[in-house]
Image: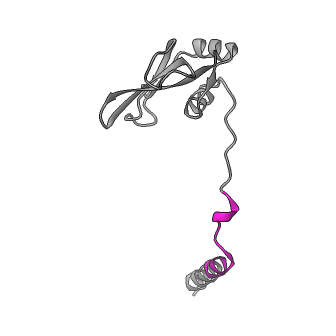
């Protein structure tokens, strides 16, 4: 049985509230779960202490048993110091400005610098 540590949505329409649960990977998002190990309230400000509540002891246990956290839950666990922070992916070079646009930006920067000096 493949286990996941994931978010189960609750709350009202346009007022989300999530439970951090251990569930079988095949069960639906808000369906049956094995254990609830915390909560996440995205409506609260980032620095609020009640935004993420996590039972670290139970999370460690389930990680040791082989439960795989989802991308969002990995961030919560990393901030709690239970797992490594995931590597930040670089933006693709394809989306970078092309040569002419870079030349224009350099020219604008040079003009702004000249105006600031003069």
Task: Identify the image quadrant of residue 63.
Answer: top right
Image quarter of residue 93: bottom right
Task: Report the number of numbered marks.
Answer: 0
- The x and y percentages for residue 22 are 54, 17
The residue depicted at 56 percent of the width and 29 percent of the height is: 73
Residue 112 coordinates in the image, percent (x, y)? 57, 81
**Residue projecting furthest to the bottom:** 118
Confirm whether the magenta stretch covers residue 116: no
x then y, percent, for residue 23 = 54, 18
Q: In this view, does 111 lie above or below 15?
A: below
Secondary structure that dominates the magenta span: helix
Q: Quadrant of the C terminus?
A: bottom right
Which sits in the foreground, 65 or 108? 65
- Taking the spot 67% from the left edge, 58% from the top edge, the residue there is 92
Is 37 placed above or below 113 here? above
Give, as a single range, the part of the protein colored magenta. 92-105
């Amino acid at each position: 049985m493949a286990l996941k540590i994931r978010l189960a949505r609750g709350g009202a329409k346009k007022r989300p509230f999530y439970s951090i649960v251990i569930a079988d990977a095949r069960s639906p998002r808000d369906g049956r779960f094995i254990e609830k190990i915390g909560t996440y309230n995205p409506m609260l400000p980032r620095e609020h202490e009640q935004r993420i509540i996590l039972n670290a002891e139970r999370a460690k246990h389930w990680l040791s048993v082989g439960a795989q956290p989802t991308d969002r839950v990995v961030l919560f666990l990393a901030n709690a110091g239970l797992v490594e922070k995931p590597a930040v992916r670089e933006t693709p070079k394809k989306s970078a400005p092309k040569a002419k646009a870079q030349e224009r930006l350099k020219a604008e920067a040079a003009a702004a610098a000249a105006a600031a000096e003069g």
